[in-house]
């Protein structure tokens, strides 16, 4: 079969609350994030593995609160005062840990937001207790924050995340293919992302629809590559 040229087109995820699938495994985290009026001290740390829905949930919260969303690694002390004038979500906080300037900006943003009564949402892969921060004051503030975690996905959520990731890539896949995949991949968000990316790439390269046959072949190849 002739192989086709492939292009790395941007994936445009849908980030509205209506696009966020709630199951028994993530419902407690969703309830806590959206109940922002009752966060202790007006702040919350949202923890979860990559691909678990932290960014999606942060955007849904931001839409309700008219919050600004900023990456922790791009924070600068000079912009903190403007950010703290309203609700703010800081994403990937743990990725900026160890960067003195980013930590200082996070610390000042935390203090200003709370002083002005503005809610602060912080997302992270790991809980603050596992951070190796340069600034002890930042660490103590984050460890003193309420925290909620996105749990490992159940079957419903795993399938829903897979369907959404296919849809984000403008791919329509039969439900039997999704059921076949969810019963055979590792129960993690990273595994879903990996298999969706691999199927998309293979389908484009070989000019084939994503069917159960192609799914089996891609899973076999991923298994071989992992050996």
Image (cartoon, rainbow, N blue to C red):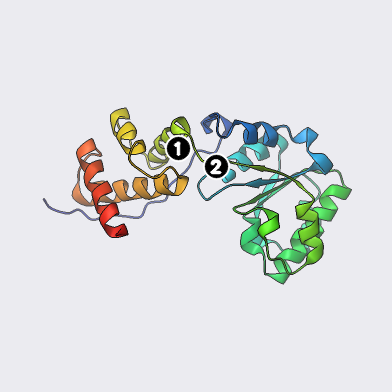
Determine which of the numbered discs, if any, sits on residue 76 in the image: none
Kindly identify which residue carries mark 1: 161
Image point (73%, 32%), residue name: 35
Q: Is residue 148 above or below residue 107?
A: above
Task: Determine the image quadrant of residue 156.
Answer: top left
Image point (33%, 32%), residue name: 179
Q: Is residue 157 above or below residue 115?
A: above
Please identify the quadrant where the C terminus is shown: bottom left
Residue contact at pointers 1 and 2, CB within 8 angstroms: yes
Image side of residue 184 versus residue 216, left or right: right
Q: Residue furthest left?
A: 1
Q: CA distance from mark 1 to mark 2?
A: 9 Å
Place of residue 102 in the rendered image (x, y in percent of width and height, measured from the top left): 70, 65
Q: Secondary structure at mark 1?
A: helix
Determine which of the numbered discs, if any, sits on residue 53 in the image: 2
Place of residue 18 in the rendered image (x, y in percent of width and height, measured from the top left): 55, 29
Image point (71%, 43%), residue name: 67
Q: Secondary structure at mark 2?
A: loop
């Amino acid at each position: 079969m002739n192989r086709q040229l492939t292009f790395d087109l941007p994936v445009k995820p849908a980030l509205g609350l209506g696009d966020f699938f709630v199951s028994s495994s993530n419902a407690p985290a969703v309830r806590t994030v959206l109940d922002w009026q009752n966060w202790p001290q007006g702040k919350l740390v949202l923890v979860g593995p990559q691909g678990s829905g932290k960014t999606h949930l942060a955007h849904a919260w931001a839409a309700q609160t008219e919050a600004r969303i900023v990456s922790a690694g791009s924070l600068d002390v000079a912009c903190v005062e403007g950010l703290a004038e309203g609700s703010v979500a800081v994403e990937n906080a743990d990725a900026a840990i160890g960067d003195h300037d980013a930590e200082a900006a996070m610390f000042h943003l935390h203090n200003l937001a709370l002083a002005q009564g503005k809610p602060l949402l912080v997302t992270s892969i790991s809980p603050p207790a596992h951070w190796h921060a340069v600034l002890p004051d930042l660490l103590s503030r984050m460890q003193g924050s309420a925290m909620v975690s996105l749990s490992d996905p159940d079957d419903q959520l795993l399938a829903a995340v897979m369907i959404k990731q296919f849809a984000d890539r403008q791919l329509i896949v039969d439900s039997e293919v999704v059921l076949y995949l969810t019963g055979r991949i590792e129960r993690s968000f990273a595994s879903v992302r990996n298999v969706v990316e691999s199927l998309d790439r293979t389908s484009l390269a070989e000019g084939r629809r994503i069917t159960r046959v192609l799914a089996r072949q891609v899973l076999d190849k991923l298994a071989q590559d992992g050996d």
